[in-house]
Image (cartoon, helix red, strand yellow):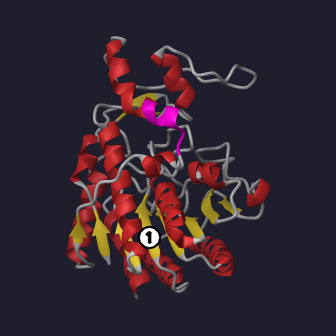
Amino acid sequence: MKTIYSEQHRLRDAKTELYGGELVQPFERPSRADIILKALVESGLGEISDPDMFSLDPVLAVHDADFVAFLETVWKEWQKKGYAGEVIANVWPARRMQCRVPRDIEGKVGYYALAAETSISEGTWQAALAAKDVALTGATDLLKGDSGIFSLCRPPGHHAARDMFGGYCFLNNAAIAAQHLCANGAGRVAVLDIDFHHGNGTQDIFYDRDDVLFCSLHGDPEDAFPHFLGYADETGSGAGIGYNRNYPMAPGTQFAQWRDSLSDALEHIGQFSPRFLVVSLGVDAFENDPISFFKLTTDDFLTTGEMIGSLNIPTLFVMEGGYDIDEIGVNVVNVLTGFEG
């Protein structure tokens, strides 16, 4: 299996994350990609290639233009205001407040942020652009006839909604790739999100569509970030009713229950009969992940890949979560190896 990877991810190297009332080193850091890349090389899974460059058109097909312009300019605006630290939201249009985009950069950040843990630093925009190129290159390879591609995207993307960033995500790489496939004749595309956290951004983007089936396995939003989406009764709207499926699960969930949810999701994907499958590949359902509460083991990820591969659908794996633990590399490789097998 070919891997698409860009060294540009290193430009996203924030120093602060708001966690437990403290500013800490971000869990989402460059070493995540280093660990995965090392495991890929050692596994001999396949070649590792640089991405092609794409315009903003595929981004604007799923994201609001004003939001994209904000991401492009926020760091400069923040510095122009005289702020010394990284960009962190501290005010939001909460319930019963006006929902207008303010002129001041502090207000803009709050308007477009869905959470405060994700700071924006110098180089974030450039890294996000490279990540979407990594995803789009993988999608293009599927269109050319490849059966399985791994897009090692960083920063991740599945929390990025049409006009909101957060959860370490700025542009929704998986959604951009899925839309690119649709726009190039795919007809139907399924997105399977196996990251521990709900893919709220992907749900937001495709919620009213019937050409993209979205299935997400994740920690119950009553207990886990992003908290305000991911309930089982969220099934789509308008033409999209029935094309959004959520599988929230409780703290301490073991693989047996998680596997049952995956089996159900795969059954619905099979019935949907998409031409392509995009997998938001988070491995933070792992038992040792520092910010999650599922109990999957390293061997379970091999089984997961085998189950996904059994659909026999050309598949793009897009990297999402899994947080700076030694096993992130072997867990990713196990999913891809299981799929190949």
Q: Is residue 304 visible?
A: yes
The segment highlighted magenta reads 63-69
Q: Is residue 324 visible?
A: no
Q: Is residue 137 left or right of residue 173?
A: left
55 and 272: which is toward the camera: 55
Screen quadrant of the C terminus: bottom left
Q: Secondary structure at mark 1?
A: strand
309 and 67: which is toward the camera: 67
Q: Determine the main secondary structure of the stretch shown in magenta.
A: helix
Q: Which quadrant would residue 43 be assigned to in this image?
A: bottom left
150 and 84: which is toward the camera: 150
Give the residue type that dot 1 points to: Leu
Q: Residue furthest top?
A: 82
Screen quadrant of the N terminus: bottom left
The image shows residue 248 at horizontal and vertical percentages of: 67, 59
Residue at image coords 39%, 60%: 136
- The residue that mark 1 highlights is 316
Q: Is residue 235 left or right of residue 157?
A: right
Residue at image coords 68%, 58%: 209
Residue at image coords 34%, 55%: 133
The image shows residue 267 at horizontal and vertical percentages of: 67, 80
Q: Residues within 10 Å of mark 1 (few under 14, many from 20)?
A: many
Q: Is residue 26 magenta?
A: no
The image shows residue 32 at horizontal and vertical percentages of: 31, 54
